[in-house]
Every structure is written in structure tokens, then in C-alpha cells.
Amino acid sequence: ATPTAVMVGVGKGAEQGILIRNAESLELARQIDTIVLDKTGTITEGKPRVTNEWWLDPSADIKGVLKGLEQASEHPLAGAVVSHLQGITSVPVSGFQSHTGEGVSGLVTDKTYFAGSKDMLSRRQINLRPDLLQQAKKWQAQEKTVVWFADAAHVLAIFAISDQVKAGSAAAIATMKELGMQVYMLTGDQEPTARAIAAQVGLANAEVVAGVLPNEKADFISRLQQAGKKVAMVGDGINDSPALAQADVSIAMGKGSDVAIDIAKMTIISSDLGKVPEAIQLSRETIKTIR
Ligand code: ADP
Ligand code: MG
């Protein structure tokens, strides 16, 4: 009867829009006590758009360089920047590089340009002006992600990018907690933005881990496991794949990247976070039937 009950559970999951890879995944889900959520595309819609900009030199040429750079990137933030620069002719960029969790870089006539996080620039000793830092802080307090555009020495522009919290995220997180789960939000975005979004979905500062690179996301999960926790990781991006691979149960958002879905033990077709506590409940009910 055991395999049959599990099969029924997997079937029920499919009816609820939760694709479960195998019986083992469902059994592991029952043991989960900690849920780690990616921010972008998991808690938020993952549909970023530029709301504010500050150019130090607003010439069409320099805007074209940024457009050329971001056109080469697959990151959702890059898409927001490119849409925003509609009407600007992009300048061809050579030597394009994607620095996972940080941003992108490329060359135009032997000059290097960067688009990415503040940390990406400070790691490269690029001068961050105090007035820009102050503006960035204000935008972050409004839950906006700040993207920096710079050459090898100076900042050229900064952008505020807004990504709405999904309608069901707060309720889903509340249900996870009612089920006894410890919940964390994990993000490559900077702490002020992360905390502002977390507050909107009922997560405290202590439940937020920000400014982490993809391999550091996996390390965070591994530390929880070393402390005896059974961890589910919910993510949607390529940058979440090391963390998904490390987790006891990995859950991908159906609208996310193929890489995340390929790795994951479960996929939420609708990308609705409310399906995550449903999956945990389903695993508990299924295993109860077996015993
Ligand atoms: P998350 O964990 O929220 O999915 P990522 O690890 O993908 O975030 O990205 C972390 C940060 O790196 C972003 O908040 C952004 O500042 C920067 N970044 C990454 N790629 C790009 C890009 N193509 N253009 C601009 N900024 C980028
Ligand atoms: Mg993401």
C-alpha cells in the first residue's frame, strides 16, 4: 500500500498544480522544518521596471553603451533597463561578461563598463559618490533595487527598479509559519531593499539574508543543515541553482528559468507561493495515510 499512497499523493499534487519529481521528494517534504525563499521572482513578481534614474552625463552615446551592455544579459533587471532605454540606439559591446550575483561588464573602444550592484563597483575600487549613495538609500527604503552603471573609475548613472510583491506572498508566508516552519528570505539584492520587501510580507530583519552571491546562498542552506534543519529552498533563477541543489527539497517556480526547474524536486506551475505550504500539507497527509 505504501507506494500506492505515495503515487496518489503525487497525483493529487499534479491536480493542485504541484509537480512532484518522485516518491522520495514527497517523503522528504514531510520532514521540512525550514523554508528558504528567494526574493526576486519568488516573493516578488519578477517583473521589474525602472521607476527613477540619475544620469551624470545624459548623452545618447553613453545611454547606448548601457543598452548594448544590458541587451547581452539575461538577467530580469537587464530587461527592465533595456525597455526603459527604448528609442536609444545601442552601442555594440565586446568582451561581454556576466558576473553572477553582481552584474555585467563589457568593452567599448577599449574602455570597460559595468552595470550591476553597488558591491560590484566597490569591489573594483570604483568611486561611489556620497550624493549617489544617499539617493540609492532613499530608493531602497521604497523597496526599490538600485542598479549602478559605471566605467572603470566613475559612476555614470544609477537606476531605481521596482518589482511588486506578489498578491499572495504575505498570506503564504503566514501559512508556512502556522505549519511550524522557520522562514527566511535569501537574496543577492542589498539589505535595505531586502528588509523593506520582507517587512511587507511579515518577515523580520533576522529572517533576511541579503547581498549574497549564488554560492553563498548554497552555503547558507548548508549551515542550516549542519544545525540539524531540514530545508526546503524555493527559487526561480539560474542564480538559485546551487542553493536548490543543496536543499533537502528544492522547489522551483514554474515561470522561472529552465535550469531551476530541471534541478528542482518540485515545481509550482503557477509560481504562486501559496502552493508551497499546500505541498507540505499534502506530504503530511500522504504519509499519514501510509502509516
Ligand atoms: P536575486 O537573489 O534577488 O535573484 P541576483 O543574485 O540575481 O539577485 O542579483 C543580485 C544583484 O546583482 C542585483 O540586485 C543587481 O544589483 C545586480 N545585477 C545582476 N545582474 C545584473 C544586470 N544584468 N544588470 C544590472 N544589475 C545586475
Ligand atoms: Mg530570483
Image (tube, rainbow, N blue to C red):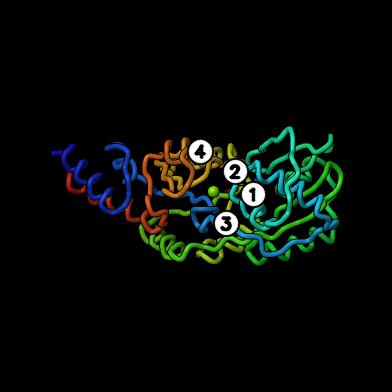
**Is there a contact, CB below 8 Å, between mark 1 and mark 4?**
no
Chain-order first, disc 1 or disc 3: 1
Residue to which mark 1 is pinned: 78
Helix, strand or loop status at disc 1:
helix
Helix, strand or loop status at disc 2:
loop
**Mark 1 crowdedness (10 Å alpha carbons): few <14, some 14-19, many ≥20:** many
- Of the pair 82 and 163, the residue shown nearer to us: 82
Residue to which mark 2 is pinned: 74
**Mark 3 crowdedness (10 Å alpha carbons): few <14, some 14-19, many ≥20:** few
| Vertical arrangement, residue 169 with respect to residue 36, above or below | below
| Vertical arrangement, residue 139 with respect to residue 182, above or below | below
How many angstroms separate mark 2 from mark 1 (CA)? Answer: 7 Å
Pointer 1 residue Cβ closer than 8 Å to ligand 1: yes
Mark nearest the camera among 2 and 3 is: 2
**Is there a contact, CB below 8 Å, between mark 3 and mark 4?**
no
Mark nearest the camera among 3 and 4 is: 4
Q: Position of residue 259 (x, y in %)?
A: 48, 37
How many angstroms separate mark 2 from mark 4 (CA)? Answer: 15 Å
Helix, strand or loop status at disc 3:
helix
Chain-order first, disc 2 or disc 3: 2
Residue at the outermost top position: 95
How many angstroms separate mark 2 from mark 3 (CA)? Answer: 31 Å
Horizontal arrangement in the rendering, residue 166 relative to residue 130 (left or right): left
Q: Position of residue 71 (x, y in %)?
A: 66, 45
Q: Position of residue 5 (x, y in %)?
A: 17, 43
Q: Position of residue 215 (x, y in %)?
A: 58, 37
- Of the pair 289 and 165, the residue shown nearer to us: 165
Chain-order first, disc 2 or disc 4: 2
**Mark 4 crowdedness (10 Å alpha carbons): few <14, some 14-19, many ≥20:** many
**Is there a contact, CB below 8 Å, between mark 2 and mark 1?**
yes
- The residue lying at 59 percent from left, 50 percent from top is 76
Horizontal arrangement in the rendering, residue 173 relative to residue 163 (left or right): left
